[in-house]
Structures are given as C-alpha cells and as structure tokens.
Image (cartoon, helix red, strand yellow):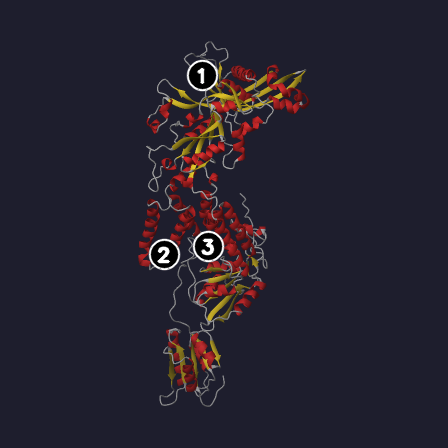
C-alpha cells in the first residue's frame, strides 16, 4: 500500500461508474474529513449484493479512519481489520478487478493513500434459507438441501466432512454470468486422473452464461448422444459427502441447488442416500424393488403389446380370456391404445409440473377420472391397458434419479413401437442395441455399467443389495481404489462376556 | 452422426415397410377351448368350441359385462377332405381367426377313432399353433355332441374336461390323462398300444342329453345328465380297437407305474361279512417290470412296492395289533395283484400290449425281439405274469381302533 501525494479518488469513482454504465444500483458513499475538502475515502458497492449490516460497520470504520487525527500515515487495511468484523480483505489495482469485486458482492474502498482499491467481502442480498430438498426426499436422513448460494452449499458439505483433506477449488465460468463453480473432492481418495480430466473439461468451457449446473453437465459430459445421464446431480449435501468419500468429485455451481457428481455409473442412479441410513436388509429389499421397477417401467407396456398382439400363446388361458374380453369392442390396436394412454399420461405429468399450484387438484381429477375411468367406460381403451400404463408410470417414479427415469421413458416409447411391429422379437431387437449402447458409454473414462461390465465382484456388496457396514470395509473398486480401506481389516473387537 | 442417422433410417424403414405382418389383436381371435374330430364318409368333420370372451368376463363396468344369459362358448362344425381344409372353411361362417394354442382337449369321435387318426397326429405335430400337449379323449359316438355340453359349474366346458382328466390322474389315479404326444409316442413304440379315456354323457334317470346344451344348465343344482369319464378306449397304433373298463385300466396303470395317489378298497382280514371293508390311501407306489426269457416263452416279473395310510376302516379287530396291520397289508397286496391280473387279462383279450412289455423285451433281448416282432400281439397270451406286491401301511391314521358297534 503506497502512500501518494494526492488521491486519484474521484477519477477512479468516475471510471467505475462509467464501466458500469451508470447503472442505478451502483452506490458510492463519500467520506470526508471535512465537508469542504475533497473526499478522503469513497465506499462503492452494488446495492443488493452486499449485506446491509456489515456495510454499516464498514462505513463506520472507514469514517473513523478518516477522522483519525493521530497524525500517523493512514493505514486503512490495518484499521479495518481491527474494527470491522468482515471476511476477506484484498486489494485490487485494475479497474476491471474492482468492478468484478463489486459484482461479486464486495465493497470497494478507494481514496487517499490507496492505489487501486481495497475490496471487502461483505456479500449479502436476498437468498433462500436451507430447506428440505424438493426433488430427492428421504424419510430417514438429513433434511437439509442445497440452496442457490454457493457459499452456503459449500458450508453444508464442509460441515459433513470436517477434514483438512476436503478441497474446494473455485473457478469462474461464463463470460457474462461470471458464475462461481467449485470443484470439491477429498484429497487422497479421489483419483487424480479423474480430477485432472474434470479440471481440464471445466477450463475448456467458454460460454456466455451458466445459469444452472445443467449447462456445466452438458458441457463436460463424455457424449451428448445418449439419453442416459453420465453425470449425477443431487440436491442433497449428504449424497455429495457420501460420493466424495467413495472417491467421486463434485461440482457445485453458484445459483442452483443441484450439485454435479462425477464420474457416475448406471447403477448409481438407482441408489438413494437413505439406503445407507436404513437397516441394510430393508435397504436391500427396497433396492431390489427399485430394480424391478426399472424393468417394469422400461418393458411392461411393450411386453403387454407384444404378448397380446403376437405371442398370445404365452398368456395363461384364463388371463387371455379376461384380456380378450376387455378388448372386445376396442377400436384401436393395442399399440395405438398404449401410445394414446402413455401420451395422455405424459401430458398430465407435464401439466402437473407447469401449472400453478392452485389448480393442481382440478387437473388430477380430470386426469385420473375423466381420462382413465371415462376412457374405459367409453370403450376407447381397455381396463387392462389403463392398469399397465398407470403401473408403469408409478414404477418410473420409484427410480430416485429423474434424469434416469426420463431416459427410461424415452426408451420405453421406442420399445413399444418395436413391440407393436415385431412382438417379442422386436423387444429383443431393441434391448440388444440398448445394452450395447450402455456398455459403450463412459463417464469420465469410467465404464458406465461398471461393476457388471467389467465385472468387479467387490462392488456387488453395495449394488443390488447393501450388505451391512461390517461387510463394506473397502471402498468400491475402480473409483475408490486409490484409498481402498474404509474400515480397518479387523472388525470391532468383541467384548468378552464372562460370568 | 451420419452413422446414427443411417441406423435411424434403417430402423424406421424396417418398421414401416414390413408393417405388422402377423399382428393379431385379441379381439380378432377365436380362442378355441376344445376341438372335436369326427369322420363322415370321406370327410373330416371338425367341431370347435370357441370361447366368447365377453360372456366370460365378469369385471364390473368397462367394455363389456358378463351376462349369464349369454353362452360362454360358441360351437360350430366345418367339413373338409383334410383337417386344415375344414379349419380354413371355418371363416365362411365365423368372424374370427380360429386360434388353437389354448385348446385344452381334443375329442375324437368313434368313427374317426376306428378309422385311425394319424392325420390328426401329423397336424398337431406339424403346425405351430396347435400343441401336442392337448389332452386326448375318445367318445363312443360323435365328438361334436360332447362339445355342446356344459360342465356346470365351470363356464368353459373344454377347459373343464381337461381339468377333470388331470385332477383325476393326480388324486384318484383311476384314469390316465393322455396327450396327443403320448399317443404319437405309443404309436412309435414297440408295444404300439395306449389307453385313451372315454368321455361320454351319462344319462341319469330323468332328462336326456339335450338338457345340458343351454345356459339353463346353470340354474339347477343337480343336472340330470352329466359329462363324465366312462371307459377307456384301446388304441393300437392310431386306431381304436376296443374298450376296457375302469378297473381293468386301473390294473394297467399299476403295471405301467403310473399310480401316484390312489385309494384301494380291500376286505378286512378275517372278515365275517362283505361289509367289513377298509380303504388304503396310496401315498407312494413303484412298479418294476423285468422280462425273463424261459425257453421260447417270456415271463414278466412285476414287482410293486407301495406305501400309504389306512384312510378308512370297518374292520372290527384291533388295529393297534401289528399282526393285524400285517394281515391288512397282505389283503392290500392281494387286491393289487388281482387288479393287475385283471388288467393284464384285458390286455391279452384285446391283443394290445397296454403294459408296454414289448419295449422291455426289445431292450433286454433284442435278438429274440426280431422274431417276436411280427406276431407279438398274438403272442401276448403266452406271456406269463409273475406279480409280487409289497404294501406297507405306514400308519393307521389318527385312530387305532375302529369306530364300530361291535367291540373287539
């Protein structure tokens, strides 16, 4: 901090104002030693990006420094540090840096004795408090979810991993949005190869704006030509912490509650953090249910179409008769019937998301009663088809990850068309390329179907079932192999009971 | 990108060009529950019992509701020089494509059975939709007549006949359930003979056969006439050559090791009157047959082992006495032996090797079989039966004594 003869303060303030185009939320407070004199200090900030209480402290401190008559050369940083309970104090020389600092929620102090300016981080402004995540709910488990504030989100993760090995790397992405993006990982567990690749891909992004982590997800994923998500996203800090402990890395983006987790495998999308909080046997049961729901959601309508229009001999006689009875007088072929119902459901679903909350119940009544019941009674669709479609729809919501269930939905339509044209052979002809596609996918170089193809038996302990923690002494192979031990090899010592 | 669009193109073209070539909606199918095959002159007469799904379904609301006034099956007949020709003529008078994959039972009329049904076997083994697992029955009359009957309280007569056949075999063992495949198998075996259950209409004291033909059959609790299994038709090759009674067929079932569960009624040891009878519930039975050549003649050694429980008793003696149980076992053995002998006698009478001894001799004495082969059916009379039965009463049930007026 050099002390110069005459302040260049007014011109700096003017330059800042000019850079911001005279925007009305750019506020400057001049602090005079004497009202007649040219000002000594100016505090500049963007209204709404700074915390009002901290700002008051700051202004007071700066004013006190201006009044200081000790005769000592003014040393603003020192005195601020002692008087203002604020965060980071940095100095910036260029105008651009000062503007950027203000846009980041810092107050900039310019004035006598300062070249450039002094930036005080007092971020504030409107933000949502920590609430229960809306998209990934659990019955047992922590109820806090990420918010739009990156600092809060990082603190939620840090609070779960109080280790010096938790590393947070900040970077700014987006030429206009200047969005803060944080890479979070645990040093010593994460694979450096994956981390370097993640850094490389993040650094390669050059885009005007990042409004949500979805932008980042698309820009850093391995391939865009797949409906299947190759990057996991979650609203839950405990999910992030759990993945970090298994050797994954997370990307938190300012302005969204959705954090990204890389790399990710296909089966991860069927796991919920609650699986680890519940008893292992119950969690295993629920997981098996989820995998069954996956197949139901993917295949049930197409199997129904195939079996009822091509391979009728596969249906038990009594069931065939009851299905045939329901199809009496139905004008549409089974494929069209199914497509019609699926389409109806998709419309209701989309409407349910978009419409104002107030009219929600009205739509559910119209959707469920009018379209379901009435369509059957009018003889447009068979009762069995309504059951198939609604069960499929419910099954698709069992899958915890929305991205995965959306992919399954797309595949379902494809398989239905194939089943309607070729029967069970069509389904087979759809499933084989689907499997080939899944096997060919990579997420940050990790095979998508990891523990199954390539086969890693160790990971099966925590895949379709979750074994008790005593059996999960090692981290999952491949992703967690850098630091494989989760618990010591020997179990907890058994207490000796002697009577 | 180019590759993907190519694949997409190919898939679309595949779907669009081929169309849904063998697509059959459920409501285009005439699901046939039972088929009957008769002969009339040079023509095959095929009768179909087609399910009327809307009459079967009793679900509330929706596309159709079941009404008891509507018949659940529709029966009609077509003719042709081949069976397929007859089937193809069905659509001259019926709206739906006949569908045979769910056919449970095939009824063969007497005339067709006597002429031989090799064409039927050929058809069932050759075509994709008709299954050789369909159960075979023969009737002493016209098969079409059987299909017109309801089997209250079941709504599907065809399925009900199949159910009668299989349930009887599993629980009582009185009649074998024979599939088309079994008949084909026997045709190509050395013995070449098989028993096929006869289904017929038993006329009771009142009413006549027509009484079961309408849905009114469901409105009474006792029906005057009933479809039931009667005798057994003896098929040599694919021809019906004669009939044998149930008790004879029962003996042949023992010979063929086909008894799983059965009940044997036997007179009590030292019974004073014929009213003193007891019943033995067979839980397990095993028959071993071995051919023994003695000179030119053959002796069949039949060893039967059976275990079971005493399920009913009118014997006045104490059952707790082990000697009594042993005596009972002797009686059971005697009864089984008699049954086997009577079955074998029937087999000899009809010159049909129903016990399948020919295959055993062929396997054991292939040289000798070559000479026997020509007139084996005539030689059956020379075959001697050497029957050993070992019956074990494993427990006398929950009572050790008999509930009786006379106390021992």
Find the distance from the CA under tag 1 to the CA under tag 2: 74 Å
Q: Are marks 3 and 2 in contact (CB under 8 Å)?
A: no
Which residue is under mark 3? A410
Q: Earlier in the sequence, mark 3 or mark 2?
A: 2
Image position, residue A11 (x, y; %)? 43, 86
Q: SS at mark 3? A: helix
Other residues around mark 2 within 10 Å, as few (<14) / some (14–19) / many (≥20): some
Q: Do we see residue A479 in this rendering?
A: no
In this view of the protein, which residue sits in the foreground, A41 or A68? A41
Other residues around mark 1 within 10 Å, as few (<14) / some (14–19) / many (≥20): some
Q: Residue at x 52, y 53 (%)?
A: A434
> What is the number of the mark on residue A448?
none
In this view of the protein, which residue sits in the foreground, A44 or B133? B133
Image position, residue B361 (x, y; %)? 64, 22
Image depth: mark 1 or mark 2 in front: 2
Image depth: mark 1 or mark 3 in front: 3
Image position, residue A244 (x, y; %)? 52, 60
Find the distance from the CA under tag 3 to the CA under tag 2: 19 Å
> What is the number of the mark on residue B402?
1
Q: SS at mark 2? A: helix
Which residue is under mark 2? A352
Other residues around mark 3 within 10 Å, as few (<14) / some (14–19) / many (≥20): few
Side of B373 where A163 appears, left or right: left
Q: Is residue A231 above or below residue B290?
A: below
Q: Are marks 1 and 3 in contact (CB under 8 Å)?
A: no
Q: Residue at x 34, y 42 (%)?
A: B62
Q: Are marks 1 and 2 in contact (CB under 8 Å)?
A: no
The residue lying furthest to the top in this view is: B272
Find the distance from the CA under tag 1 to the CA under tag 3: 73 Å
């Amino acid at each position: 901090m050099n002390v110069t003869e005459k302040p260049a303060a007014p011109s700096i303030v003017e330059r800042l104002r000019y850079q911001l185009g005279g925007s009305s939320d750019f506020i400057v407070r001049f602090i005079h030693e004497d009202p007649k004199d040219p000002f000594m200090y100016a505090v500049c900030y963007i209204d709404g990006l700074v915390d009002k209480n901290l700002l008051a402290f700051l202004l007071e401190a700066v004013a006190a420094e201006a009044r200081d008559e000790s005769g000592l050369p003014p040393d603003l940083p020192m005195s601020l540090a002692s008087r203002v309970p604020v965060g980071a104090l940095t100095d910036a020389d260029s105008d651009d840096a000062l503007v950027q600092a203000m846009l980041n929620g810092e107050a900039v102090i310019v004035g006598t004795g300062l070249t450039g300016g002094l930036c005080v981080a007092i971020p504030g402004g409107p933000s949502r408090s920590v609430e229960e995540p809306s998209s990934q709910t659990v019955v047992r488990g922590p109820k806090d979810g990420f918010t739009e504030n990156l600092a809060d989100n990082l603190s939620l993760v840090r609070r779960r991993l109080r280790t010096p090995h938790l590393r947070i790397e900040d970077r700014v992405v987006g030429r206009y949005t200047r969005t803060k993006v944080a890479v979070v990982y645990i040093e010593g567990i994460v694979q450096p190869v994956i981390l370097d690749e993640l850094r490389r891909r993040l650094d390669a992004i050059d885009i005007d704006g990042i409004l949500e982590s979805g932008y980042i997800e698309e820009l850093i994923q391995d391939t865009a030509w797949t409906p299947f998500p190759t990057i996991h996203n979650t609203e839950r800090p405990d999910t992030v912490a759990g993945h970090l402990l298994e050797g994954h890395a997370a990307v938190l983006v300012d302005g969204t509650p959705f954090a990204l987790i890389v790399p990710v495998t296909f089966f991860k999308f069927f796991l919920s953090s609650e699986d680890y909080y519940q008893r292992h046997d119950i969690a295993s049961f629920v997981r098996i249910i989820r995998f069954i729901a996956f197949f139901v959601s993917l295949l049930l309508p197409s199997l129904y179409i195939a079996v009822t229009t091509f391979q009728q001999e596969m249906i038990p006689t009594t069931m065939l008769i009851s299905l045939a009875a329901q199809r009496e007088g139905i004008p549409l072929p089974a494929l069209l019937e199914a497509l019609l119902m699926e389409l109806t459901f998709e419309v209701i679903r989309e409407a349910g998301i978009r419409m104002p909350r107030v009219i929600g119940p009205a739509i559910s009544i119209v959707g469920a009663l009018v379209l379901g019941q009435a369509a059957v009674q009018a003889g447009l669709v068979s009762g069995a088809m309504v059951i198939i479609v609604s069960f499929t729809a419910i099954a698709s919501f069992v899958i915890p990850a929305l991205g995965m269930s959306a992919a399954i939905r797309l595949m379902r339509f494809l398989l239905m068309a194939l089943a309607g044209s070729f029967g069970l052979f069509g389904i087979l002809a759809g499933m084989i390329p689907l499997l080939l596609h899944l096997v060919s996918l990579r997420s940050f170089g990790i095979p998508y179907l990891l523990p199954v193809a390539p086969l890693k038996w160790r990971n099966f302990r925590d895949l379709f079932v979750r074994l008790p923690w005593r059996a999960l002494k090692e981290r999952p192979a491949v992703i967690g192999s850098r630091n494989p031990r989760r618990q010591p090899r020997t179990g907890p010592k058994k207490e000796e009971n002697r009577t | 990108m180019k590759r993907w669009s190519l694949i997409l193109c190919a898939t679309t073209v595949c779907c669009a060009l081929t169309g849904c070539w063998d697509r059959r909606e459920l409501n285009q199918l005439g699901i046939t529950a039972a088929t009957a095959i008769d002969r009339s002159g040079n023509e095959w007469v095929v009768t179909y019992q087609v399910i009327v799904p809307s009459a079967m379904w009793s679900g509330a609301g929706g596309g159709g509701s079941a009404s008891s006034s509507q018949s659940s099956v529709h029966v009609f007949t077509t003719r042709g020089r081949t069976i397929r020709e007859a089937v193809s003529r069905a659509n001259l008078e019926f709206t739906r494509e006949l569908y045979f994959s769910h056919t449970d039972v095939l009824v063969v009329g007497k005339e067709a059975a006597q002429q031989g049904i090799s064409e039927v076997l050929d058809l069932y083994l050759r075509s994709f939709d008709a299954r050789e697992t369909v159960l075979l029955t023969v009737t002493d009359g016209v098969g079409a007549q059987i299909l017109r009957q309801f089997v209250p309280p079941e709504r599907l007569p065809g399925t009900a006949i199949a159910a009668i056949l299989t349930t009887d075999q599993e629980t009582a063992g009185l009649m074998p359930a024979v599939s088309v495949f079994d008949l084909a198998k026997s045709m190509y075996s050395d013995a070449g003979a098989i028993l096929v259950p006869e289904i017929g209409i038993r006329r009771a004291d009142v009413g006549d056969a027509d009484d079961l033909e309408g849905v009114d059959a469901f409105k009474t609790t006792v029906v005057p006439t009933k479809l039931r299994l009667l005798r057994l038709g003896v098929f040599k090759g694919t021809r019906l050559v004669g009939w044998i009674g149930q008790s004879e067929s029962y003996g042949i079932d023992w010979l063929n090791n086909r008894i799983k569960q059965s009940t044997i009624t036997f007179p009590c040891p030292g019974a004073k009157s014929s009213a003193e009878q007891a019943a033995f519930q067979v839980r397990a039975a095993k028959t071993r047959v071995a051919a023994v050549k003695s000179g030119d003649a053959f002796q069949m050694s039949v060893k039967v082992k059976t275990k079971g429980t005493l399920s009913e008793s009118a014997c006045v003696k104490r059952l707790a006495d082990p000697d009594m149980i042993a005596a009972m076992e002797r009686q059971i053995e005697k009864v089984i032996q008699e049954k086997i002998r009577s079955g074998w006698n029937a087999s000899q009478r009809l010159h049909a090797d129903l016990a399948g001894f020919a295959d055993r001799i062929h396997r054991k004495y292939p040289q000798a079989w070559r000479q026997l082969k020509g007139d084996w059916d005539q030689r059956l009379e020379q075959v001697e039966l050497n029957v050993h039965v070992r019956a074990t009463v494993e427990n006398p049930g929950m009572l050790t004594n008999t509930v009786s007026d006379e106390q021992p």
